């Protein structure tokens, strides 16, 4: 009987210990920020979609333009040095404290002002080309594959005339 009780208590103790060792994660993806498009640069943390209710939150901001970086702390921050013609790098570190554990959420974005609000600025691959210079290719002129006008027909090289590709052999 003692052995059964000892095994039962050990099992319960191990389960309790295992449950306590599982870390509690908050969900950094549920934290966002908003920027007020008024004078200067007003930024604030939005935690309305946060999964847990942490005991406390600490926020550190870093906002950089092409000439300097500025820092502040708190849920709301104002950076009067930033103007709408700046390209801005906005970063935050959020420390979420709950039940003797802490999670740190870090994010940085590049932003530009589009005339009415601050939007994400991407230097990635282009997704579209809006304007291209069209050549009036029905004029009988000769162009190379780069679109440059040629004064004579090249031999053994592809050229364009009237929207068609040609190649001249001897």
Image (cartoon, helix red, strand yellow):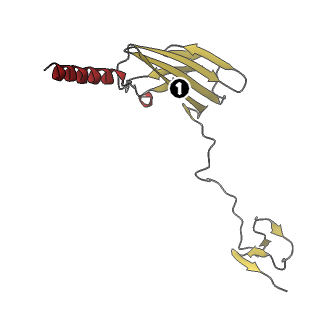
Q: Is residue 59 above or below residue 137?
A: above
Q: Is residue 74 above or below residue 149?
A: above
Q: Quadrant of residue 78?
A: top right
Seen from the viewer's position, the closer of residues 40 and 13 is 13
For image coordinates 63% across by 41% down, the residue present is 123
Q: Position of residue 167 (x, y in %)?
A: 77, 80
Q: Quadrant of residue 165?
A: bottom right
Q: Quadrant of residue 86?
A: top right
Q: Is residue 96 above or below residue 85?
A: above
The quadrant in which the N terminus is found is: top left
In the displayed structure image, the side of residue 46 where residue 126 appears, left or right:
right
Seen from the viewer's position, the closer of residues 155 and 38 is 155
Q: Around disc 1, counting alpha carbons within 10 Å, would you say few (fewer than 14), some (14 to 19), or many (20 or more)?
A: few
For image coordinates 74% across by 79% down, the residue present is 166
Q: Is residue 87 visible?
A: yes
Identify residue for label 1. 106
Seen from the viewer's position, the closer of residues 80 and 71 is 71
Could you tell me which secondary element the residue under label 1 belongs to?
strand
In the displayed structure image, the side of residue 45 where residue 121 appears, left or right:
right
């Amino acid at each position: 009987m003692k052995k059964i009780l000892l095994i039962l208590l050990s099992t319960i103790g191990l389960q309790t210990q295992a449950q306590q060792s599982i870390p509690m994660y908050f969900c950094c993806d549920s934290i966002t920020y908003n920027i007020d498009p008024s004078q200067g640069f007003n930024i604030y943390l939005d935690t309305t979609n946060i999964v847990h209710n942490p005991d406390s939150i600490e926020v550190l901001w870093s906002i950089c333009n092409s000439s300097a970086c500025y820092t502040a702390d708190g849920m709301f921050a104002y950076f009067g040095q930033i103007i709408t013609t700046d390209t801005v790098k906005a970063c935050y570190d959020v420390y979420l404290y709950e039940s003797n554990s802490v999670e740190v959420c870090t994010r940085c974005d590049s932003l530009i002002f589009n005339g009415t609000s601050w939007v994400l600025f991407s230097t990635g691959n282009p997704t579209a080309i809006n304007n291209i210079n069209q050549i009036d290719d029905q004029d009988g002129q000769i162009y190379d594959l780069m679109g440059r006008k040629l004064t004579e027909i090249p031999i053994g090289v592809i050229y364009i005339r009237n929207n068609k590709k040609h190649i001249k052999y001897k």
